[in-house]
Image (cartoon, rainbow, N blue to C red):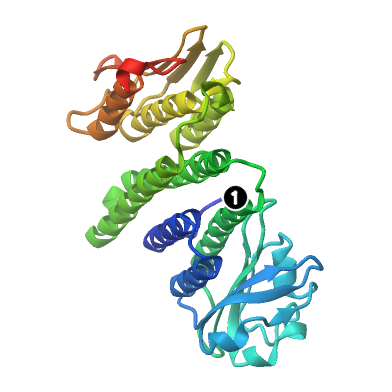
Amino acid sequence: MTSLMEPTLAAHALSAATEITTAALSGDEPDTVLASVVQKAAELAKADLGLVMVRAEDGSVSVEAAYGSHPKDLRGLLLPADSVAGQVARGGETVVTEDFTVDPRTAPHVPGELRDYGPFAAAPFGAGGRVLGSLVVYRKRGSEAFSPGTVEVLTAFAGQVGVVLALAEGATARHRVTLYQERERIARELHDVIVQRLYAAGMQLDRVRRRMRKRFAGTDAARLGEAIDQLDQTIEEIRGTVRSLRSPAPEPEQSPRTDLAESARDEVRIAEELLGYPPTLELSGEFADIPAERADHIRAALREALSNVVRHSGASETRVTLHRDAHEVRLRVRDNGSGVPQGVATRGLRHLAERAESAGGKFYLNSSPSLGTLVAFDLPLEPDKRAS
C-alpha cells in the first residue's frame, strides 16, 4: 500500500515521539507527558484543539489532557462508550470527518463545549493490546479538513506514544518485578519494534529518492534527504535511550534470552521488500537461548550488512548464513553486486568493526566490483572480559 505521509511531517512526528519517549521513560509526571503528547499532536496536525481521552473500565472516555482554546474547561469531559472516541479507544480504526457536528457517526455525541469545531480526526492512543484511549484533534468549523497524509502521521504518532506510555505505566504498576527487569523489557520493545519500523521507513524513503532522483526538483530532493537524515538521527536517539535504560544484570545467569532466528527472519523480510527479491537465509544451530546482549550485536550487524546491499550493491542475489555452535555465533552476508563504493556507508561499517572489537568478536569485509561483497561478523556467546 502506498504511503501518503509527507516525509518532512513524518520526520517531525518521529522526532516528537522520541522526545516524549525519553520523557516518559525518564520518570516525568504522567500529566506533564500527556500535556506534551496533545500539544505535539495539535501542532503536527495544525489543529485548533487537541484532546487525549483515556478509556475507563466501562468503555467510556474522559479528557485527561487538552491543548488549544480553553483547555482547562475540557478536563474531565466524559463521552460514552458508544461515541466515536469510545469506539476508537477500544482499538477501532482511526475516524476522520469534515464536520463532526453533522456526520452521522459523530453527531449524536457532540458536547456543547465543542460545537464551534468541524473537521475532526480520532486515532487509537496506543496499538495492539496497549490502547489507552483516543487522541483527537479538531479544527474550527469552516476550516479545511485534515488531509489523508496528516491523518496517517497522526495515527502513527498516536500509536507509538500510546504504546510507550502503556509500557511506562506498566513499569510503575508491577511492584513485584525488579527495576532492572522492567527497564530491560521496555528497552527491548523499543529496540525490536520501534527501531525496526523506523529503519524500514528510512530505507523506503531512500529507495524512493534514488529511483526518482532525476524527477525531483532540487528543493524536493533536499527535503527528502533531510527527512532521511532525521530518521537516522531519531533511530540513534532511541538507541541512546535504550542504552541508558539498560544496566548490568545482577547475576550472569539472569541475563534475558531472545530468539535470534526469528529476528533474522524479520530483518530478511524487510530487505526482501526493499530489494524486490528474497535473500536466502540459512540457519544452523539453536538460536532461542542466545543472551540478549549478544543477540543485539548480531542483529545490528545483519541490519547494517543488508542496508548496504539495498543502498549500494545493485545485487540480484543475497545470501545470509547464521551458524551457532557451543562457543560462538557466526554471521555471513554475501551478495553478487558491485561492491561498496569508496567513501560510501563507511560509518555504519566502522561502527560494526568497533562493536565487534568491544564485544570480543571479529568483523571483516571483502568487497570488489567484480565479486560483490562479503560481510562477516563472529561473536563469542560469552562476553570477553578483556574486551570490556
Q: Is residue 209 above or below residue 56?
A: above
Question: In this picture, is 329 found above or below 198?
Answer: above
Q: Residue at x 52, y 19 (%)?
A: 281
Q: Mark 1, residues whose alpha carbon is within 10 Å: few (<14), some, or many (≥20)?
A: many
87 on left or right of 173:
right
Q: Can residue 362 be seen in this snapshot? A: no
- Number of numbered discs overlaid on the protein picture: 1
* 193 displayed left or right of 353: right
**Where is residue 209 shown, x and y percent of the image?**
33, 48
Q: Is residue 338 left or right of residue 64?
A: left
Q: Is residue 293 above or below residue 109?
A: above
Q: Nearer the viewer, residue 94 or 77?
A: 77
Q: Residue 142: in sight, yes or no? A: yes
Judged from this view, the residue extending furthest toward the top is 326
User: Residue 267, position in %: x, y?
Assistant: 50, 31
| Residue sitting at x 45%, y 59% | 23
Q: Quadrant of residue 64?
A: bottom right
The answer to which quarter of the image holds residue 94 is bottom right
The answer to which quarter of the image holds residue 106 is bottom right
Who's the residue at 76% across and 75% down the image?
83
Q: Which residue is at the front of the view, 113 or 316? A: 113
Q: Position of residue 115 (x, y in %)?
A: 64, 92
Amino acid type, residue under disc 1 in the picture: Ala
Circle 1 residue = 171
> As rendered, which of 10 and 85 lies closer to the eye?
85
165, 12: nearer the viewer:
165
Q: Secondary structure at mark 1?
A: helix
Outermost residue, left side: 343
Q: Quadrant of the C terminus?
A: top left
